[in-house]
Amino acid sequence: MTSEFIHRFVPAKGEGAPPLLLLHGTGGDENDLLQLGAMVSPNSALLSPRGRVLENGMPRFFRRLAEGVFDEDDVRRRALELADFVEVERLRCGIGRPIALGYSNGANIAAAMMLLRPDALAGAALLRAMVPLSDLLRPDLSGVRVLIASGMADPIVPPSNSTRLAAMLQAAGANVSHETLPVGHQLSRADLDLVREWFRTVHTREPAESR
Ligand code: MLT
């Protein structure tokens, strides 16, 4: 199994800020979240892979059978591949365990990574995330900080689904903040403000390498 992904890497501009793993949504690429990442944490190194699955030419991080219906074997396989990639790049670039900043399909693969490879990430900001796997998984995520930002008018993610994801991660020991914004599936200014504020608290309370 290869762990190569087309990606962008931006070295840290200062010291002390944990690296960010940027994970784009369906149809996006490795450039999409670089600006958001730099706004959330200007000093962080940024690692931004492109999803390797193509759906009608649109990059994604795993296959789906329909909107909101995932090919769970593929989710498992791709989440582990991405975790392997992160591990290799961490060594190559000399960075610590990253905090994922994922949007939509990117948030879903980040959630799957946390469930399947709990050591891969130091935390995660999951924007418009859903439950990625129906398995009853109980990884040890104690001390891992997670932000889930849902949209009140999101036509893709029902509130019951994001609430279930929050409960799954909490049951695994993660420290979860679940916020619902007055928006739809698209990212908004409110997401930036929320993630920035959450990141500030994560960063000052718990350096990424303390786990
Ligand atoms: C997914 O397929 O991961 C979710 O439905 C979100 C999306 O990419 O539209």
Image (cartoon, rainbow, N blue to C red):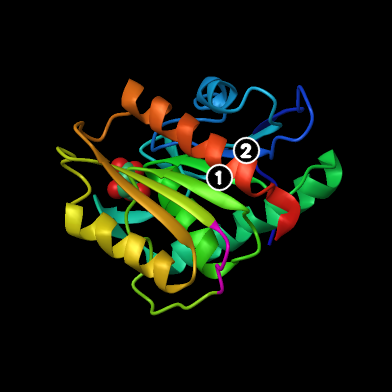
- Total of numbered circles in the picture? 2
Segment colored magenta: 140-144
- Say if the magenta span includes residue 7: no
Q: CA distance from mark 1 to mark 2?
A: 6 Å
Above or below for 66 versus 76: above
Q: Which mark is residue 211?
A: none
- At x 55% / y 67%, what residue is drawn? 141
- At x 49% / y 70%, what residue is drawn? 173
Q: Residue furthest front?
A: 205
Q: Which residue is mark 2?
A: 20
Query: Which picture quadrant has residue 52?
Result: top right
- Say if the magenta span includes residue 143: yes
The amino acid at mark 1 is Ala
In the visual, does 203 lie left or right of 35?
right
Mark 2 crowdedness (10 Å alpha carbons): few <14, some 14-19, many ≥20: many
The quadrant of the rendering that contains the C terminus is bottom right
Above or below for 139 versus 164: below
Q: Position of residue 205 (x, y in %)?
A: 61, 46
Mark 1: which secondary structure?
Answer: strand
Mark 2: which secondary structure?
Answer: strand
Q: Earlier in the sequence, mark 1 or mark 2?
A: 2
Query: Which picture quadrant has residue 151?
Result: top left
Above or below for 18 versus 188: below
Q: For the residues labelled 1 and 2, say whether their Cβ atoms are less than 8 Å apart.
A: yes
The quadrant of the rendering that contains the N terminus is bottom right
Q: Which mark is residue 100?
A: 1
In the visual, does 166 lie left or right of 35?
left
- At x 51% / y 48%, what residue is drawn? 124
Q: Choose between 19 and 34: the one closer to the eye.
A: 19
